[in-house]
Image: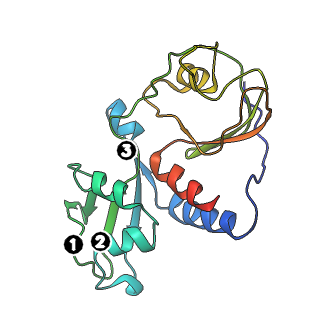
Amino acid sequence: MKNILPVRVFGGEAVDQFHHIISRTKRERKLDGGTEENRRMRALTLTVDETWNGSTVKHLLRSKLHMAEGLIARVKLRETGLMRNGERVFTNAILRTGDVLRVETGDEGTVNEAIPIAAPLAFVYEDEDLAVLNKSPDMAVHGSTGGQGCTVANALAALWGRETAFHPVSRLDRGTSGLMVIAKSAYVHDLLRRML
């Protein structure tokens, strides 16, 4: 169903920075088991080294994980959004070498508002964090008030389920074909958006 090919969509330093953040943390990332909600909630787990000793949680989130203020504000309100050594922690907490910080990066309570409509999509690349697809010229990215048929948002709602929010990083007009990047969380969307 998916044609997976290794492709670099972005070039230069921005790509290297994104791949460094994602690859470095992928080794430490955990997908929680249990309920469907927990399986969808992505989390990064980091062990604090001497470089970050004495820093606040917020400083590490902004500097190392490049998290936006709005996302930090949402994550800190979740019961398990920020955990240090298995205990809930807030952004003003001081970190010490050896502390294990777990940060939820998945979307909570967001849905793809598009009505699920099954349609073929030509995936070029897909992983846990993003997808790159070759958008056909006859498909719009998302719906308009005119309701002009199936969109990428509709097709992804059918494929991934409405529980996965739709975060297009790049958009192409109807009538235009080409590669389109879609983030699977607001965190990854923000990282990629700032690199464009």
Question: Which amino acid type is shown beneath numbered disc 3?
Answer: Asp
Place of residue 44 in the rendered image (x, y in percent of width and height, measured from the top left): 42, 58
**Residue under label 1:** 92
- Tell me residue 21's x, y (percent): 55, 65
Tell me, yes or no, whether the two marked residues, 2 and 1, touch with CB atoms within 8 Å: yes
Q: Is residue 78 visible?
A: yes
Of circles 3 and 2, the one toward us is 2
Instruction: Give the mark nearest the N terminus, 2 or 1.
Output: 2
The answer to which quarter of the image holds residue 62 is bottom left
**Pick the front one: 146 or 123:** 146
Residue sitting nearer the eye, 141 or 47:
141
Q: Secondary structure at mark 3?
A: loop
First in sequence, mark 3 or 2: give its number.
3
In this view, the residue in front, 127 or 147, is 147
Dot 2 amino acid type = Val
Can residue 47 be seen? no
Residue occupying image coordinates x 63% and y 62% = 19
Q: CA distance from mark 3 to mark 2?
A: 22 Å
Residue 113 is situated, as x and y percent measured from the top left of the image, at 45, 24
Instruction: From the image, tell me which residue sits under label 3.
Output: 32
Q: Residues within 10 Å of mark 1 (few under 14, many from 20)?
A: few
Mark 2, Cα crowd under 10 Å, few <14 / some 14-19 / many 20+, is many
At a point 20% along the width and 64% down the height, the residue shown is 90
Left or right relative to 180: residue 127: left
Q: Residue 57 got which mark?
A: 2
Position in image of residue 28 (x %, y %): 47, 61
Which sits earlier in the primary sequence, circle 3 or circle 1?
3
Please report the residue visible at 43 percent of the width from the left and 74 percent of the height from the top.
63
SS at mark 2? helix
